[in-house]
Amino acid sequence: MNSLKNYYAGSVQRPCFYVRLIALAFMVSFAVSPSHAQSLTEVTPQNTDRLQWIGLEEALDTLDLQSKGYYFLNRMTLLDEHSLAFLDFRRESVIAFDLSTGLHQAFGEEWIYPLGEGTHQVGNLFDIQPSSRGLFLTDVVNRRIIEWTTKGEWDRNIELDRVTPSRLATCQNGSFFVLLENHHRKGLFAFVDDQAKVKAHFQQIPRFSQSSIFHRDGAVLCTNNRLFFGAYYFDYLRSYESDGTLRWSRDLVGFEQNEKLLVQGENDLGRYFTINPKAKRSIGNIQEFDNTLWISFSGRTDGLMTRVDLYNTETGDYIQSIRMDEHFSEFVVGSMGLMLHYLDEDSESTHVVRYPLPPTNQYGESVLGKTSSNP
């Protein structure tokens, strides 16, 4: 009798009950462990603020891109120890170069490989990564990840539920991390297993913060099924486990923080917000080689890199920096050496230069990292 009474009596108090229930569900859905919820701006300072310089030896060889008819290449990546791949944004295709033979081929161009879906069915290719079957690419417009074989065949689509993939970090076991372009209430990263199932979302950021969009564009890398991430305009480098647990968060040596990223402008259409032309970019891309993180650094030249910094993969500790004579766009590193991609004054691709790996255990000039001596 009492149970029936209490049940029906609840109808009188039901609005308050449901309000409390909804509030509780809301808090639970957003409640995560401190390591998941830690602010992106919280970092452990480096043990030094001095840059340790090492230099490059003479170049081994040069790959002339323009002589082969390619001018708008980006997202340089190693497919294997002998093959370089780029996104060709003009043709919406992938261009691969075999460094051992000098041959090159185009993936996804229907007049070359009329197999499966072609480039007209791709919304906007934004990132490229090697996969166990060939190539992973992010299709931003169609909110999916596509996979092509090494023969240029369309292999499969990986649909993502209501999220837009921006950048990919593929792992050795076939799983991968995705940096999301749009907002997801559980975080800006997704971890997808080797069966193409989303296993975790993590790292929440404020949705309506003016700077939130800038946290969703950066460099990502997976090694040993761990994620490494740095946003382009911020002073942090972070590492996560596959479930989203934060391993460490460190600042970057030699980067002067941006005080203001957004500024307001005005034209005939009205007022608008845009990136501050004085904003400095912290990093370019991240690579891993010989248990060390290699990170390109821009300093005061937004979009062009001035050096490559080395950090410890286990702790995020700064190790040393490789000084470059010229500004470059991006780099990759492997057993064949360090390869730098150069652009001309019109931001068109010109060439890739391969250098021998520097002696990373030797130190040269030491300078204070957070002063005007920083390039």
Image (cartoon, rainbow, N blue to C red):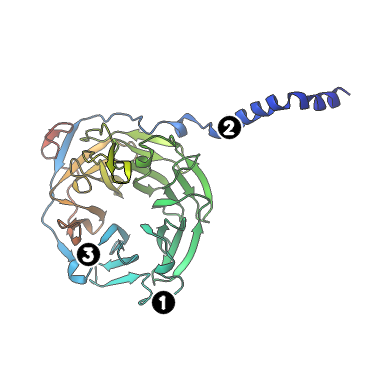
Residue 1 percent coordinates (x, y): 89, 24
Q: Where is residue 147, by image quadrant? A: bottom left
**Residue 148 sits in quarter:** bottom left
In the rendering, which numbered label is found on residue 281?
Answer: none
Camera-side residue of 39 and 33: 39
Q: Residue at x 45, y 61 (%)?
A: 146
Of residues 168 and 249, which is closer to you in this image?
168
Residue with the mark numbered 3:
71
Name the side, left or right, on which 298 lies relative to 22. Answer: left
Residue type, label 3? Tyr
Tell me the residue that label 2 is attached to: 26
Picture residue at 25% right of the left edge, 40% below the top? 282
Q: Position of residue 9 (x, y in %)?
A: 80, 24
Q: Earlier along the polypeptide chain: callout 1 or callout 3?
A: 3
Q: Label 1, label 2: how many angstroms apart (C-alpha)?
A: 50 Å
Q: Earlier in the sequence, mark 2 or mark 3?
A: 2
Give how far apart the Cα atoms at labels 2 and 3 are.
Answer: 50 Å
C-beta proximity under 8 Å, tags 2 and 3: no
Towards the viewer: 72 or 289: 72
Q: Quadrant of the C terminus?
A: top left
The answer to whether residue 243 of the structure is visible from this angle is no
Circle 1 residues within 10 Å: few <14, some 14–19, many ≥20: few
Residue 86 location (% of width, % of height)? 30, 62
Identify the element where label 1 is drawn.
loop
For mark 3, give the secondary structure. loop
Q: Residues within 10 Å of mark 2 (few under 14, many from 20)?
A: few
Spatial separation of the CA atoms under disc 1 and disc 3: 24 Å
Image height of 313 relative to 107, above or below = above
First in residue order: circle 1 vs circle 2: 2
For the view shown, which residue lies furthest in the front direction? Answer: 268
- Around disc 3, counting alpha carbons within 10 Å, would you say few (fewer than 14), some (14 to 19), or many (20 or more)? some
Q: Is residue 111 left or right of residue 358?
A: right
